[in-house]
Amino acid sequence: MKFGVVVFPGSNCDYDAYKALKDILHQKVEYLWHKDTSLQKSGCVILPGGFSYGDYLRTGAIARFSPIMKEVIKFAKSGGLVLGICNGFQILLEAGLLPGAMLQNSSLRFVCRWIHLKVERNDLPFTKACEIGQVLKIPVAHKEGNYYIDQDELVRLERERQVVFRYCNSQGELNSDSNPNGSLANIAGITNPKGNVLGLMPHPERASEGILGSADGKVIFESIAAHFKGRG
Amino acid sequence: MIKKEKKAKAEKISQAVVYVSLKEGVLDPQGLTIKRALEDLGYKGINEVRSGKFYEITLDASSLQNGKKLVAEISNKLLANPVIETFEIKGLR
């Protein structure tokens, strides 16, 4: 199994993801150029963080029409694993692979700091190495991470258990103080109904070894690797 | 001698302005902050400020109707995100 990391013009966490997978997880990983039309047989595609196309228009709005995205959408719809981190999450929302949209942070500021995340489910390929209720210390770095969805859709999202991560304090308690951007219901990461597409605003690749301040993000990549282990 | 007739240009240039704004009920942190700033400046009676963007587009269109159709299509597809935004096309000529 091989990971594919998509590189858009303006991606800036592509190498972080590549390095975490290659050097820390010892996985096979390859870059996928945004103009390519092949996923090079990747088993899991990662849309990394950054500012694709300068965040012009709306975050992710232009990247969503990149040639590679046609393939990513096809791949996701056929059940392939797609992980969108930060700007990658925004691209997944714009592409309609995940529901909802991002508004500007309620503070109107770019927020770049360590936060805590509560894991809501561990029955997904992305979280199978986690415990339910586990608290992960991972950084965020964004200005548009204020997750929005209309009330009916939010009810449906909760009912279908599509919320995977929520912002919390170090004790795992959900409150408005631990919400860095004003997201509805402290939502930090969601999945699609099938559970093969995951988007999250925090950066697990920036918390993948102790020297970075936390290795808590590693568990997400370990989960994906474990999911494929033994499948050849 | 046969003179080659110069083909008249079928297309004409149209112009449109597309206003994109957040849907009613969607939180607008920027608008709220502007409203607070106005209150801090001493302005009274400001009930609400909503922010948005506009795009000026010039395009080739064979008719006004086709131009309208095209601008509506690109507004739907790219300029606005229907999950949070609405758009209005003005000044098409």
Image: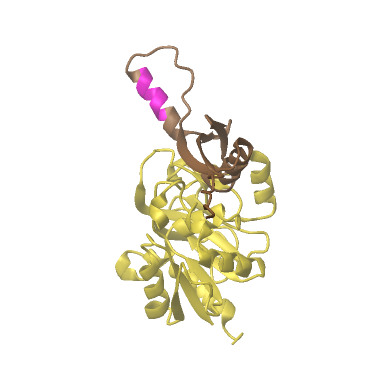
Q: Dominant secondary structure of the magenta stretch? A: helix
Q: Quadrant of the C terminus of chain A?
A: bottom right
Q: Residue lying farthest left? A: A211
Residue B38, magenta (yes or no) = yes
Q: Position of residue A62 (x, y in %)?
A: 48, 54
**At 45% from the left edge and 61% from the top edge, which residue is drawn?**
A136
Pick whichever, B13 or A71, lies toward us.
B13
Task: Please state if A52 lies on the left or on the right of B27 as rendered.
Answer: left
Pick whichever, A187 or A58, lies toward us.
A58
Q: Quadrant of the N terminus of chain A?
A: bottom right
Residue A147, magenta (yes or no) = no
Q: Which chain shows up in brown?
A: B
Q: Position of residue B66 (x, y in %)?
A: 62, 41
Q: Position of residue A55 (x, y in %)?
A: 41, 51
Residue A92 is at least partly visible in this image: yes
Residue A141 is at least partly visible in this image: no
Q: What is the magenta range? A: B33-39
User: Drawn colour of chain A?
Assistant: yellow
